[in-house]
Amino acid sequence: MCLAAASASASSPARCCLSPSSAALPSRFLRGLLGSPTRPSPSPPPPTTTPLLRRCTPFHRMAQYWTQASLDKNKALVDHLKQYGAVRTDEVAEVMETIDRALFVPEGSPYIDSPMPIGFNATISAPHMHATCLELLKDHLQPGMHALDVGSGSGYLTACFAMMVGPEGRAVGVEHVPEIVASAIENVQKSAAAPLMKDGSLSFHVADGRLGFPDAAPYDAIHVGAAAPEIPQPLLDQLKPGGRMVIPVGTYYQDLQVVDKNADGSISIRNDASVRYVPLTSRSAQCQDP
């Protein structure tokens, strides 16, 4: 649900973004700003560790500019994401322009590059994080393909998936808080993806995302929005040969991993970015008071 990095410890509620400037960026973008990335020291960072982007001065200044300028149009937001390299392809630009972020943000300013609260200790991720995931998965979101969004939250990214795979494909959002699922359905009904939900090619379900959603498997694309200590086996099982999963993996030190299942069923994994995510956990843990 929330692809922002977090400065909380592993005991924090799932998918609760704690800082607007703490989202992870693709490694290729960070390398251009920060130089070659290095691993932190072996000892775990304290809860007050400065998030990665607070050390990323050019992008942090950019985020401040967006806030001060109060971007009020979805296309203007996408244009800025393109300018700063988060959106790199026409496919991703088109879907982000088509699905209006404002329809998925219950309060606050929808067109700034920041996570926004949606209730139940959950957020909608920052726009550049949505762009990052769409860019990583775009080749596996072609018309007719199947996509699974674990921790679908507001429904924004699931709606983008649905627009890309089209009516002949299938996009499934899984979320373990019923009230969030109900809100996501309402959000999508106001969006350009509404006809896809009406015809059944886009759906949301109350379920434990760690177990995937076998009913629509196998999936060409799987997105997971919180960090797991290791990749859940049910998600690997439900990934189609030739498919791709994007998932943050780790506890204190985490990597945004790109997981490809080869034609012979073997798995290839590469790290796209060093990140800090809150844990992929149970409904009760997410909904408890911080």
Image (tube, helix red, strand yellow):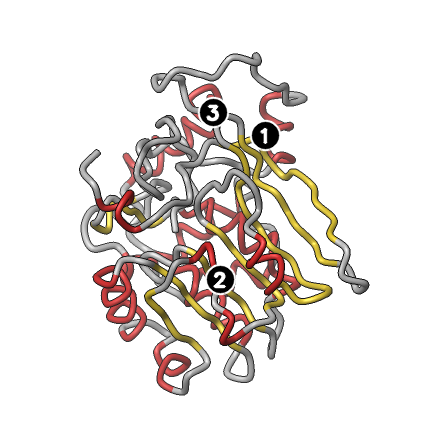
Looking at the image, which is closer to me, 77 or 142? 142
Instruction: Tell me the CA gap for discs 1 and 3.
Output: 10 Å
Which amino acid is tagged 1? Leu
**Tag 1 secondary structure:** helix
User: If you read the primary sequence from the N terminus, does the residue marked by circle 2 or circle 3 appear first?
Assistant: 3
Q: Quadrant of the C terminus?
A: top left
According to the picture, the residue beneath numbered tag 3 turns out to be 52
Instruction: Please say if 179 is above or below 195.
Output: above
Marks 1 & 3, CB-CB < 8 Å contact: yes
Q: Secondary structure at mark 3?
A: helix
Q: Disc 2 vs disc 3: Cβ atoms closer than 8 Å?
A: no
- Which amino acid is tagged 2? Gly
- Image coords of residue 248 (percent x, y): 53, 41
Q: Residue furthest right?
A: 264
- Mark 1 neighbour class, 10 Å CA radius: few under 14, some 14 to 19, many 20 or more: some
Q: Are marks 2 and 1 in contact (CB under 8 Å)?
A: no
Q: Which residue is mark 2?
A: 212
